[in-house]
Image (spheres, coloured by chain):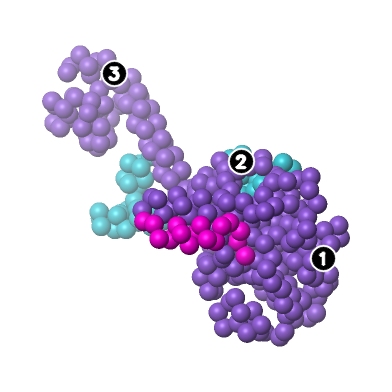
Chain colours: A cyan, B purple
Amino acid sequence: MYGWIWRHLPGPTALRLLQAVLLVAAVCALLLFVIFPIIEPRLPANPITGPGTVGQ
Amino acid sequence: MSETRSGGWDFSAGGASPIGGGAGPHGSATAGTPNGRAGRPGGGAGETIRRIVFGTGEALITLGLVLVLFAVYEVWVSNIFADRKQHQAQQQLAQAWHTGQDPLHGEDKLNLPAGKQVVLPLGDGFANLYIPAFGKDYVKTVIQGTDDADLDRGPGHYVSSQVPGQIGNFALAGHRVGKGEPFLNLDQLRPGDKIVVQTASNWYIYTVLGSQPAYQAALKLTGSARSDAIAAALAATDQQGVPGREIVSPSAVQVIAPVPDHPGQSPTRALLTMTTCHPKYTANQRMVVHAVLTRAVAAKGTALPKELAGGTL
């Protein structure tokens, strides 16, 4: 997967490196600011307060 | 080496590989991709298995990195979202007070009988919590309710518990790490520390329970003896059997009873209880701190009570 992406990035090595870093940053931002906030409340491990529990 | 290769388990991928020559399966995995591609364009059974193993490895490493990133989200990024919500709640409450709309309708007062049930709008702020021991700028708007969404906005008030100043227990829950972490430093509270609650009409000053003489004595010690003695001073119960601090299981709901730890008894004084996760980063137990109302003063303009920096009331 990573090899495939690397081979499909255009330009010389320095430019590819820059693009790779930007790609990683974009994926991290997507996960941290969009995907995790959506899935986090749905996770079963999330400690909840309810009848019979003292919360958080 | 050639036997291994024909068996299909050669990760060095390709007999032409000069690097893979004596290295065997280890060390040559990373070099495999370009060499394999150049040396064996067609593939074969060995190539397929190599690709599957390599792809699975990459997927597992990726999953591991995503999980690490999720931990980063939980302890750090979630605070950004929660702080924004808390800020919004503070603005809303300030605006409501400014326009004469008190969610409590002025019903809170010193030693309000425990039987009086004050109904508050769920999910909205109705009081501010100041804890000078957490820093002179520490202020959190208390949200009515303890759902996940409520606790994302700020410390939540257990709906079944009493309101500030009322006889009984004004009980709050707050996150320890992440999601605004209002009670991150709950373990830093000491017997005698002040906790100030502001409503539209009044300021209520609560004092953390536990033995203050024992705490002063503990300060003279050093090392682990000191921290043990401080813990013991906090755990000391008062004449009504309520400690300053206790560590309990999440199911120990008696800690938020009108008389904490004595669910059957009818209360005679106004207490404040704060609960949070313990130990840090886990939800295995709850850290619970109890405080007793020691003073109340009517709100007067923007003046602060003496317990806060620059206070005059």
Badge 2 marks a residue whose secondary structure is loop
Q: Chain of mark 2?
A: B
Mark 2 burial class by Cα count in 10 Å: few <14, some 14-19, many 20+: some
Whether residue B168 is in magenta: the answer is no
**Circle on res. B249:** 2
Indicate which label's residue lies in the foreground, 3 or 1.
1
Badge 1 marks a residue whose secondary structure is loop
Q: Position of residue B179 (x, y in %)?
A: 57, 56
**Which residue is at a point 60% across and 43% down the rendered structure image?**
B248
Q: What residue type is disc 1 on?
A: Leu
| Nearer to me, B112 or B135 | B112
Q: Chain of mark 1?
A: B
**Which residue is at a point 78% across and 81% down the rendered structure image?**
B99
Disc 2 and disc 1 on one polypeptide chain: yes
Q: CA distance from mark 2 to mark 1?
A: 31 Å
For disc 1, the marked residue is: B112
Q: In the rendered image, is residue B174 in sight?
A: no
Q: Chain of mark 3?
A: B
**Which residue is at a point 58% across and 77% down the rendered structure image?**
B308
Marks 3 and 1, the one that precedes in the sequence: 3
Quadrant in which the C terminus of chain B is drawn: bottom right
Badge 3 marks a residue whose secondary structure is loop
**Which residue is at a point 58% across and 48% down the rendered structure image?**
B246
Magenta span: B207-222
Marks 2 and 1, the one that precedes in the sequence: 1
| Nearer to me, A1 or B119 | B119
For disc 3, the marked residue is: B8
Decide if residue B69 is on the left or right side of residue B28. Answer: right
Please say if the residues under marks 2 and 1 sit with CB atoms less than 8 Å apart: no
Quadrant in which the N terminus of chain B is drawn: top left
Q: What residue type is disc 3 on?
A: Gly
